Image (cartoon, rainbow, N blue to C red):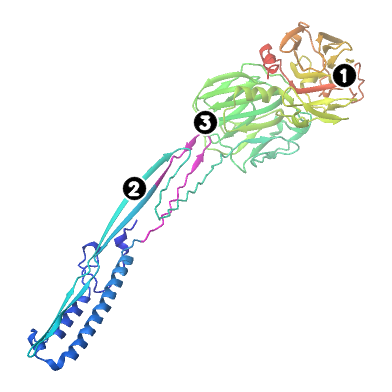
């Protein structure tokens, strides 16, 4: 900040130095005027000359008066100069605006906080001016006239005005450092300091290179335009979800999909590849699911296949094999995972780890990605024989929980805000019939059913409910209202009709299964106008198990489950016949339902207990 002396305006002739006002020698022009006056009053340097010139008294008085006037004028000038000097030595206060910019950066996995330091500099300038007032004293000696001599003595005394200016500059710097907030306190005496703080937040978005191919009658990608091009004219068939389609490959026709418009990145990164597969043929040879190959060199070809009737995934020389024999003509969820941080490489089957080891990362330069075919090493190609659906890729190692839900959480209906959309990975949304209202639920909101209202899926969509002996789980909160009546809570139609979960006219909860006839597991009375958690699990080994409020209440023991092999339709809170199927028994449910989960696996007792205690 400039000092006050830097801003002084200097006037010609007032100072011998224009560099520093405090060290200048002040030379007011009045001194020269006084000298001239002296010359006028004493022409020959003596007073006797004036005394002997009687006839010059009047002119001398005239000159005296003029001299006094001139002195007065110069006194005024001196006073003006002093005032001007005071003004000239006043410092100019420069308003300092301090702008502090804070920047916050978000990366894919790293959060950086920049500590902001705000420094406020306050400069106080004190100017002390000492002024000696110029006093001009004129002493006139009374003229004494005698007969012979008249003497007039005039004494003029001039006091020189001296102006002394002292400039003191005090600079105080206060620094406040804070990671959360900055407080600036400014104390100002007749000086206004304005501090402006500007905060800028910059967010660096993480680029998600994930990809998802639905294969709904095309090879388009859902997220990032990794659109595929079919090769060899593959066809389409019914999706594992019942809605949409899956892609059908014939190995003998060299059918596959290639993705070249954008490159999927695998080199030295974590990743997860998932797909639903329906193999029509399995053998000792390889059938390619997903691949990317650069050349015939070690670590440069990525391949996810079936080999020897099991899953197989690797980087040509660094591979991992599954341990479970795959089933032909049946949908299975499969995954290949690599975690760069640990070197962990795994294959997953239906939400369970099927093979695992550690290895170095994939080293190939990203090139065309293939679906339904792999190459390793080139030019050897291995084509898939069967159906592929819901193929997805993510540039991270998914968690066990995520992969388990992707494979086995068929549908989840929270009913929050009256929603009947599927909150699970498959998007199997419901349709309502009749009046369904939103009420306060056991968890957030729930749906109230009355006067025969119910929910249903308008298309066959639940694959596992149509497969014999396929495990499953139902979990929900039930709150019957009004009075007890024979009613259906969950009804399934897969070419036959089964009321999986019902209530009797006495209020007992009942779990049912079909094995050429109904298999029934009876539960306790469910209290009216109160929330009760109900869990229903099935596996061929454990049979039907009924849980109430997290506790196992009854079981059927080992029992088979007979199914038609067709995709199933479902009805919730009713048993309205769909596809020309008779409802069998039980009427519509009157009451409220909340947090409805449908799994294609048998949950454990601990998992049921967790759902019963949200």
Check residue 123 for magenta coloring.
no
- Seen in the image, is 141 located left or right of residue 181? left
Instruction: Give the residue at mark 2.
Output: 172
- The x and y percentages for residue 197 are 47, 48
Q: Residue furthest top?
A: 557
Residue 494 visible in the current orientation: no
Q: Nearer the viewer, residue 61 or 120?
A: 61
- Magenta segment's dominant SS is loop
Q: Nearer the viewer, residue 181 or 162?
A: 162
- Seen in the image, is 17 located left or right of residue 309? left
Q: Is there a contact, CB below 8 Å, between mark 2 and mark 3?
A: no
Q: Earlier in the sequence, mark 2 or mark 3?
A: 2
Check residue 102 for magenta coloring.
yes
Q: Quick check: 395 above or below 581?
A: below
- The x and y percentages for residue 523 are 80, 9
Residue at 12% from the left image edge and 92% from the top image edge: 54
Camera-near label (2 vs 1) is 2
Q: Secondary structure at mark 3?
A: loop
- Per the rendered image, the range of residues in magenta is 92-119
Label ID, residue 362: 3
Q: Is there a contact, CB below 8 Å, between mark 3 and mark 1?
A: no
Residue at 70% from the left image edge and 16% from the top image edge: 612
Q: Secondary structure at mark 2?
A: strand
Residue neighbourhood size for the residue with mark 1, other residues' Cα within 10 Å, grouped as few (<14), some (14–19), many (≥20): few
Q: In the picture, which quadrant includes the C terminus? A: top right
Q: In the picture, which quadrant includes the N terminus? A: bottom left
Q: Earlier in the sequence, mark 2 or mark 1?
A: 2
Residue at 23% from the left image edge and 84% from the top image edge: 65
Instruction: Report how far apart the C-alphas of labels 2 and 1 lie in the structure.
Output: 79 Å
Instruction: Give the residue at mark 1.
Output: 482
Residue neighbourhood size for the residue with mark 2, other residues' Cα within 10 Å, grouped as few (<14), some (14–19), many (≥20): few
């Amino acid at each position: 900040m400039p000092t006050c002396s830097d801003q002084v305006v200097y006037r010609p002739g007032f100072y011998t130095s224009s560099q520093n006002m405090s060290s200048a020698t002040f030379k007011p022009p009045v001194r020269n005027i006084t000298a001239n006056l002296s010359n006028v009053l004493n022409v020959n340097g003596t007073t006797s000359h004036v005394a002997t010139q009687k006839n010059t008294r009047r002119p001398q008085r005239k000159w005296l008066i003029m001299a006094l006037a001139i002195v007065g004028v110069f006194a005024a000038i001196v006073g003006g100069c002093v005032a001007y000097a005071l003004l000239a030595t006043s410092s100019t206060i420069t308003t300092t605006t301090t702008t502090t910019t804070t920047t916050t950066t978000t990366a894919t996995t790293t959060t950086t906080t920049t500590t902001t330091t705000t420094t406020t500099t306050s400069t106080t300038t004190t100017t002390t001016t000492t002024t000696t007032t110029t006093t001009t004293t004129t002493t006139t000696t009374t003229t004494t006239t005698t007969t012979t001599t008249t003497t007039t003595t005039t004494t003029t005394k001039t006091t020189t005005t001296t102006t002394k200016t002292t400039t003191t500059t005090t600079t105080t710097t206060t620094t406040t450092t804070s990671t959360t907030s900055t407080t600036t306190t400014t104390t100002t005496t007749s000086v206004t300091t304005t501090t402006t703080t500007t905060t800028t937040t910059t967010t660096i978005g993480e680029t998600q290179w994930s990809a998802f191919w639905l294969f709904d009658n095309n090879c388009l990608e859902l997220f990032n335009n990794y659109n595929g091009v079919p090769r060899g004219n593959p066809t389409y068939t019914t999706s594992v979800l019942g809605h949409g389609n899956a892609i059908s490959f014939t190995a003998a026709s060299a059918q596959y999909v290639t993705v070249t418009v954008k490159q999927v990145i695998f080199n030295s990164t974590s990743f997860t590849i998932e797909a639903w597969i329906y193999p029509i043929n399995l053998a000792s040879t390889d059938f390619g699911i997903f691949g990317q190959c650069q050349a015939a060199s070690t670590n440069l070809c990525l391949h996810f296949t079936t080999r020897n009737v099991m899953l197989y995934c690797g980087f040509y020389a660094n591979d991992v094999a599954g341990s479970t024999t795959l089933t032909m003509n049946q949908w299975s969820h499969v995954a290949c995972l690599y975690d760069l941080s640990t070197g962990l490489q795994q294959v997953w089957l239906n939400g369970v780890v099927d093979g695992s080891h550690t290895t170095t990362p994939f080293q190939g330069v990203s090139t065309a990605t293939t679906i339904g075919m792999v190459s390793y090493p080139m030019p050897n190609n291995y084509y898939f024989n069967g159906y592929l659906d819901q193929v997805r890729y993510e540039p991270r190692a998914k968690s066990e929980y995520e992969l388990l839900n992707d494979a086995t959480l068929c549908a989840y209906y929270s009913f929050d805000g009256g929603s009947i959309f599927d909150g699970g990975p498959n998007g199997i949304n419901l349709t309502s019939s009749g009046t369904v209202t939103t009420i306060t639920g056991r968890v957030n909101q729930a749906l109230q059913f009355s006067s025969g209202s119910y929910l249903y899926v308008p298309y066959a969509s639940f694959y596992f409910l149509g497969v014999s002996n396929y495990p499953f789980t139902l979990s929900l909160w039930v709150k019957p209202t009004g009075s007890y009546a024979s009613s259906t809570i969950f009804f399934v139609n897969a070419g036959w009709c089964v009321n999986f979960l019902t209530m009797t006219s006495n209020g007992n909860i009942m779990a049912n299964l079909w094995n050429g006839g109904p298999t029934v597991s009876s539960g306790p009375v469910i209290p009216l106008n109160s929330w009760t958690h109900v869990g229903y699990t099935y596996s061929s080994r454990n049979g039907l198990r009924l849980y109430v409020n997290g506790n196992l209440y009854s079981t059927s023991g080992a029992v088979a489950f007979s199914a038609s092999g067709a995709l199933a339709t479902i009805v919730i809170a009713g048993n309205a016949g769909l596809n020309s199927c008779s409802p069998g028994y039980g009427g519509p449910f009157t009451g409220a339902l909340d947090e409805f989960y449908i799994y294609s696996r048998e949950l454990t007792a601990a998992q049921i207990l967790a759902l019963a205690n949200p």
